[in-house]
Image (cartoon, rainbow, N blue to C red):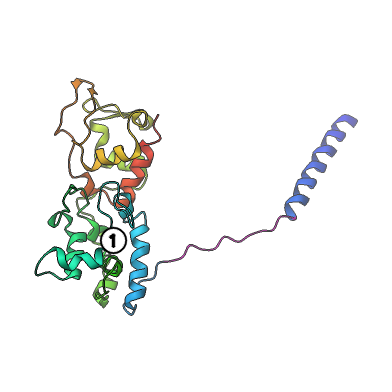
Amino acid sequence: MNNTLKVWGFIIAVVALIAGFASLIPQLESPAPEVLEISGDLSGAELADLGRQILESPEAACLACHGLGREGLRAPDLAGIGARAADIVAGQSAEEYIHESIVNPCAFVVDGFDCIMPTTLLQTLGAAKVTALTAFLQSQGGEVTVSLSADDVAAPPEGDAGGSGVAGTTAEEIIAAAGCAACHQIDAVGAEGMLGPNLSSVAARLSADEIRQSILTPDAIIADECPNGPCDAGIMPKDLGNRLNGTQLETLVAFLSNLN
């Protein structure tokens, strides 16, 4: 009995000591995440600053391919684009060229690069954020001429209403919705596809950049071995870059990059 009381006494003393120590640690209140406010009365500089935040966001994922002040991994450097834009296509203003390049990227492809940019940014970002992004790119050596209309601010992203995009936010949901499991074996999610290469340890043979390239331009890197023999080109859908938004693409790349 005495031993039991001693044990309980020791436990109570330890708990009290831990509680007392914890009370000495300053309790920091986590600030609420800053909400990206978009209104129709922003100045050109404010709109461009907002556009920079959008450019750097996972939602747009522009810097996954483009560089800013350096050559991008798969797409041109955007520094100075505001100054260059007016001279690229005759008869178009810098504003028209930049906006068109965002919403219809295959219309103007820079020499030496492929058209791998998703064509769904207007749907996933909405008109207001595309306008802000245009403003930021104009500010890179040029003059900001765009402004937000009340309709732009009020309009939600078209992707909110559905469409041909891929549903899901987690890698598992995206893999299921995109149909990856129909062709690929991916042990981590229980996928048993027997047509394309086994992706269960894809990070052992491909870097994150190569995985991203394989999603955006699937025939760029052809795996040597598939379940039924050598892998063939032209099997994997080429529109995933259009159907995935920026956040989904990077979520999928991050997931596959950890499969060793």
- Residue lying at 31% horizontally and 56% vertically, measured from the top left: 60
State the predominant SS element of the stretch in magenta.
Answer: loop
Where does the C terminus fall, quadrant-wise? Answer: top left
Q: Which residue is mark 1?
A: 125
Q: Is 225 displayed left or right of 201 in the figure?
A: left
Badge 1 element = helix
**From which residue to which does the magenta span run?**
24-35
- Residue lying at 16% horizontally and 33% vertically, measured from the top left: 235
Compared to residue 249, the image places residue 57 above or below, namely: below
| Nearer the observer, 79 or 100 | 79
- Residue lying at 19% horizontally and 65% vertically, measured from the top left: 85
Asked if residue 221 is among those painted magenta in the image, a careful observer would answer no
| Nearer the observer, 176 or 209 | 209
- Neighbour class for label 1 at 10 Å: few (<14), some, many (≥20)? many
Compared to residue 145, the image places residue 58 above or below, namely: above
Q: Amino acid at mark 1?
A: Leu
